[in-house]
Image (cartoon, coloured by chain):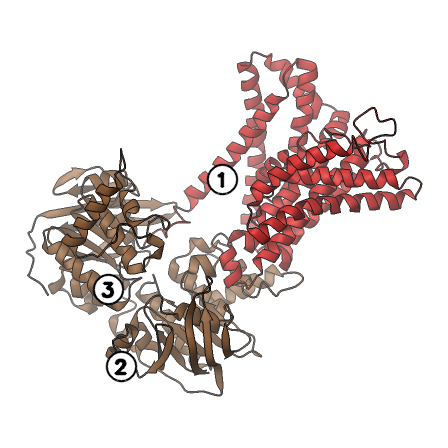
Chain colours: A brown, B red
Amino acid sequence: MTSPHSHDAPLALALRGIDKRYGNVQALSAATLEVRSGTVHALLGENGAGKSTLMRIAYGLERADAGSLFIRNDRVRVTSPADAIASGIGMVHQHFTLVPTMTVAENIALGGRGRLDLADVARRVAELSTSTGFALDPAARVETLPVGAQQRVEIAKALVHAARILILDEPTAVLAPAESTELLRWVRAYADAGNAAVLITHKLPEALGVADEVTVLRRGRTVLAARRDDVTPDALTSAMIGEELTGAKLRSSDEHQRSRSASGPAFRAKGLTLSDAAGVVRLRDATFEITAGEIVGIAAVEGSGQRELLRALAGRLAPVSGTLDRPSIVGFVPEDRHHDAVLLNRSLAENVALRGAGARRGMIDWDAMSARTERLMAEYDVRAEGAHVPIRTLSGGNQQKLVLARELELDSSSERALVVENPTRGLDVRATAEVHARLRSAAHDGAAVVLYSSDIDEVLLLATRVIVVFERSVRELPLDRERIGQAMVGAA
Amino acid sequence: MRHEKRPRAVWRDSIVRELAQAVIVLVAIVGTTALLLAVGGYAVDSGLAALWRGSLGSWYAFTSATLVRAIPLLFTGVAVAVAFRAGVLNIGAEGQLLAGAAAAAAVAISLNGFPAVIVVLLALAASAMGGLAWASIAAYLRSRFAVLEVISTIMLNFVALHGVSYLVRGPLQEPTHIYPQSSTINDAFHLPRVVGAGRLHSGLLLALGVSIVAGWVLRRTAAGFRLIAAGESPSAATSAGRIDVMATTTLTFLASGALAGLAGGVEVLGVTFALYENISPGYGYTAIAVALLARLDPWRVVATAVLFGGLEAGAGAMQRDAGVPSTLVTVIEAALILAVVAVGALRRRSSFPDAAATPIAA
């Protein structure tokens, strides 16, 4: 850890007694958060605990029903992001708010007033690059940048407006391990320079590793606020998820219960070459087998060809050359759930009906579909009012559980196989544990499961074998974190 | 979300809500009309009285004016609703209607002397094919070159308008070559009138059938669900549903064109009995309003088509009896659409805060 920060450092940002209600949902009730200058403050909580809502209020994106906001002990009214920026607050959203077709400089200039002097913006970007250590090319188009660099552009946008308080919403969710480490190191340095950083996160190790202070929200209430050194991981876990699911239970569910009820190979690739939609070769000459009953982890940094590999295995992408034997039906859980997996405005039953819709003929018996959906909801513990509610009204975890249920539901005749891509992204501790348990039991029941996660620890937690994709080629490695991490970035 | 099992109370609530909305729409129409009449310096009472007389004031007005105008709006309204549901922004119902009218007129005129039933059926089939063919131009440009259908269909509306103008001065002109219109269609080929209902013709039954079937297809069939999924999220439909989105949307586009073409055929055989330039007072454009007000549901289109048919009929009466320009009604229709769109946006906002963008909380 870094130098201890005194509990009586001046307050940079304080939210006190914040209430917020959406319709029937009390998102926040008397929530409180106090962030001191010179500290990194971790804001923890399950999905739906109100973390993002609280921070959106601080940033002026939402209006609180009650409560007050203080910046450096002055009570202020923040009714728009412009107010927040003027008060020195910056926010980096989980889903980036960049214009992909614009350059870095243009994105940073967005939201400015008066005359647009791109040369001046470019100069300021260059200054930022030297002062922060971020390598940013002002003339690069954002859509050509990797995710980590896009995030740095987001941060630069806030810093250009001289943000002294930076809110980062799940910043490491989209990053590779090395990028995460680098980002957190930067956040540390930013705080040490006398600024304040609020880190919204699900990841306990990350929070404990970098934060000076932690606040835990549960169901819209602040249930714990303490210095990092005064709390244990177990205390934080039980504060986040309440009494019914303690750290001990979580760990026990994480015990490796690997099964080898294996038969023949479910997938067999020989000299497999794949290219993306633009025709660029993404994977060359890959040969491997995946057997029923195992969970094969795919480890790769973004853009290594794993995306195309997963889609080929799931039958969503035809090989350019080589052969790929695969089961006729493969369940697929893509990482961008809202974009690729669900119809947000349609009901749960309709989303269950979506699977196989392309081949279905004749009529749909919606009563039967609703009954089937309700069965899946019960089996997978999907919490919703009923099969008729739009899926967008569910939390991310419940949406993901329904998608998993849909993709794992197979008629007995077919071979079982499942390809999942970042299946727990954006999910809270409890939902993550449930998804993990589902994947394990699917493999236990004889399904071939292929798992890609940008979180290497998740891969190691679940996988029985690991295949690393780097620079268009595949390689199998033993379950060794160090070696896999090096292979992912080509260091071994 | 309409077709799943729901508790009885939910059904009752939704029926009450639909009725309440209908009442609000009617009150809004009367209120806006009165306001516009007053602002325009016309006598409010005589204007409203004329609107009433021309649309609902008598059995004759209801059947021969309102319902007769509702028929082409019903076909084109369903055509637009179905296309929009699939994410196909077909603004070309007007052009497809004209193509259908021309095809039906050509068949009915050239087959003089054949058995009436066969000619009528062939003419109706020809009108559907004409509309389909007209839509297929935009559908091909869309699937092959990714040309936006909003642009291409609007352009094709003008092409169709001038095409009809050419036909009625050239190949299809009546034998004396004096008037810019086709010969009159043989009386035997006219669609039979509905007994006791003035000029109302049996095209109404076909139109009702079309909207009932279309609503049923959307609600109950696999093909209808594919259409909705493709319109809702092409990426999820492709990835999760393994749906061929381009094939689905292209087929929907063609079907939409066929329905709009049918409107033209029914109009020629049931109302105008000849092809001429101003055969449609913009039914294909009003259809967009009809479909949107019906929230793109073919069953609700029945109600909104009658509503707009009544407005158009009443507008004619206002112009004749009270000297009020009929464009005033166009303004009311436009205001109605704005109100519908605004209410829809508000409803989405209040029940699901920023649902589309971000989850409510982390």
Per the rendering, the mark at residue A480 is: 2
The amino acid sitting under disc 1 is Gly
Q: Nearer the viewer, residue B52 or A139?
A: A139
In depth, the one of B256 and A61 nearer the eye is: B256
Q: Is residue A142 above or below residue B17?
A: below
Picture coordinates of residue A129, whole percent (x, y): 18, 53
**To which residue does mark 3 refer?**
A180
Residues at marks 2 and 1 touching, judged by CB atoms closer than 8 Å: no
Identify which residue, A401 or B252, lies in the foreground.
B252
> Residue B304 lies in what quarter of the image?
top right
Kind of residue at badge 3: Ser
Residue B16 shows in the view = no
Q: Residue at x 23, y 38 (%)?
A: A83
The answer to whether B354 appears left or right of B95 in the picture is: left
Q: Nearer the viewer, residue A170 or B148?
A: B148
Up-down: is A464 above or below A216? below
- Name which quarter of the figure residue B170 lies in: top right
Q: Callout 2: helix, strand or loop?
A: loop
Report, in whole angstroms, how far the alpha carbon at label 2 lies from the one at label 3: 20 Å
**Which mark, by number, is residue B344?**
1
Could you classify mark 2 by the number of other residues whose Cα lies within 10 Å: few (under 14), some (14-19), or many (20 or more)?
few
**Count of all numbered marks drawn on residues in the image:** 3
Q: CA distance from mark 2 to mark 1?
A: 55 Å
Q: Nearer the viewer, mark 2 or mark 1?
A: 2
Q: Position of residue A434 (x, y in %)?
A: 37, 70
Q: CA distance from mark 1 to mark 3?
A: 42 Å
Q: Marks 3 and 1: in contact by CB < 8 Å?
A: no
